Amino acid sequence: MSNEPRAESAHDLGSVALEEHGDRLAPGDQPTGVLTVDESTSWADGTTHEALLVIAEGITQLAGFDVAAVSVVRDSQHMQVMAVAGSDEARDILLGTFTPITRLMEELEHAEDWGMFQFVPHESLDPESESWGWVPDFEPASGPDAWHPMDLLVAPLYGPNGELRGTLSIDCPSDGRRPDEAHRRILNRYAEQAARALYIAVEREAFAEQVRVLSATREVVRNAARERNIGVMLDKIQPSLIEGFRSIGSWIHTFDEDGHGLGAIYAGDGARVEMPEHLITIAERAAADSWRAQQVGLVSRHQPYSPRNAKVSEEEFQEILRFLEGIGVGSLLFVPMGAGRECLGSLVLTRALGDSEWTPAEVDAALEVGRDLGRAVLNARALDRERELVRELKALDDYKTKLIATLSHELKSPLAAMLANIEFLQETVELDTGALAVLAAVDRGAVRLVRVVEDLLLLAKVGDPHLPLLTRPVNLPDVVEDVVNLAAIADQRRVKLSVDGEPAQMIAAGDPAELDILVTNLLSNAIKYSGSDSIVTITLSRDEAWIVLSCEDQGIGIAPADRTQLFREFFRSELPEVKAQPGTGLGLTIVDRIVTRHLGRIEVESVLGHGSTFRVFLPAA
């Protein structure tokens, strides 16, 4: 056999290629414009290749032809030679190559209808056309029915719904003659069997491809859902993207990254993706259009530009191709990412020059990945903004604490001077009754301001996260006893104080001064809002690892609407009974801060008009 110039036709066993100059090829050379692929990346598994090879070998053994090839439709424009039997030279040249379907159909326009097979005699070919091809090396026999090396015999194979699935091409009849009517009927039966076998093999391959891509997609989604940092997320899903989609790389382009219109590009291997600004603009517009249409874009030098449903102009398409070839990329899948109606960016999957084209299963799976990654990006962005908000709120809270502490310190000294001067005037200067009444009012106001300042300083102290808590064993019964003995206001209001509980093993872990303030504020609050002759009861009990301090009163109670704000700074109820009592609204806030610092908790039970119970849980020493 030899390689000779021949008319371009489909009888080169499905390997028709685009060749502009008609250069001769050495055995094994790849014609210009034909995409060769490695078998490991062309077929879903080896069983599909083996099944098609069995079809081709069966034809050569039983149908009276020495060479046979099976091609399979790979996309709307190409078929791929999947199996060649009978000639090692033909196999080396043709196996794995792609055939433009339109060229095949143009050749078959000159064919004679032999049933499933279509025969194109060499006489109908244009001898002036320059092309290449594998030609068997033999001298045709004499006679009108002699088989010529340029003759073509191919059977287009269709699926159950009439869609083209592939072709069966045969060459070199054993007897050197064109098949007669009887031989043609036998060939048609073989073609029918080949069509059924091809359909089963292709369906099996498609199913295996779907399973493989689905598995990869599931792994991508699983890894994406775990990570809230977009850059780290792409690093984790990159292996699954490369394996599942047979890509050489990927990057994610996010929009409005910082909430102010700025985006970012993340590459899976950490490399910077340098894209011209105008291409970034094109990508953003195309991603938004693709998300609305729920379509995946395909850019490849083997996929001609189509104005139908195009997201970019033909000029932009060619510019993208030039950019891709400049970075060693042969084709890419452009996958929009989004959630709901919002497009959040795009995922780009790339393949090298010479790699296989993207399958429909990969395109469909990529769109699902874009949806899942869109949700992951949205969650990551929401978490980032939430973290930023927490940082801002924390900074604001720290500023507020420092402001309160600073103002309180600045007020403390002038108030001390005021009180000293008031006391001096009251004791050393003889004043009339009116002047003394004015001084007494000023004294009461100053004392009230001193209490506010002390509460503010105390609030700043117990609310400072940078101030460490120095804990030690504290005997809570002693603390309660000291506070009750100092509660002189109880006698003035004729409120009875009661202390219950077993004093043994009531040792809490905490700061004695802060726990003293906690008990004082709870007791003062209960006394303040209790009527005459009512009872305020303090109870100490043990609940496993907790010391429980309960303060129960029979006072005015707490309105349900006020309970959610009970521990907020400066909060005071709108109830007239509450407004009638002086206060800063900081007592319970200080209690809550102290309990939090001690890693405890506080519970409140109250019935409006019947009293309240505050229950504090402190860790036992």
Image: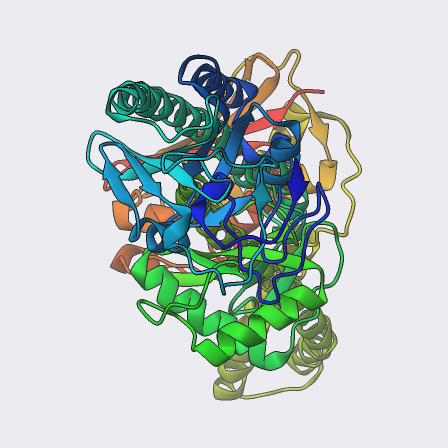
Instruction: Give residue 184's quadrant in the image.
Output: top left
For the residue pair 126 and 305, the one nearer the viewer reads as 126
For the residue pair 616 and 554, the one nearer the viewer reads as 616
* Residue 550 place in picture, x, y as percent: 48, 28
State left or right for residue 107 relative to residue 513: left
Query: Quadrant of the image for the N terminus?
Result: top right
State left or right for residue 472 relative to residue 257: right
Residue at x-position 50% and y-position 17%: 57
* Residue 45 place in picture, x, y as percent: 54, 23
Q: How many marks?
A: 0
Residue at x-position 30% and y-position 46%: 111
Specify whether residue 302 is in view: yes
For the residue pair 178 and 247, the one nearer the viewer reads as 178
For the residue pair 280 and 24, the one nearer the viewer reads as 24
Q: Is residue 562 above or below residue 169?
A: below
Instruction: Give residue 412's quadrant in the image.
Output: bottom right
State left or right for residue 4 relative to residue 121: right
Residue at x-position 32% and y-position 22%: 187
The residue at the far left in this view is: 161
* Residue 140 place in picture, x, y as percent: 51, 36
Specify whether residue 613 is in view: no
Q: Is residue 148 above or below residue 185?
A: below
Query: Quadrant of the image for the C terminus?
Result: top right
Q: Is residue 361 above or below residue 436?
A: above
* Residue 24 place in picture, x, y as percent: 67, 55
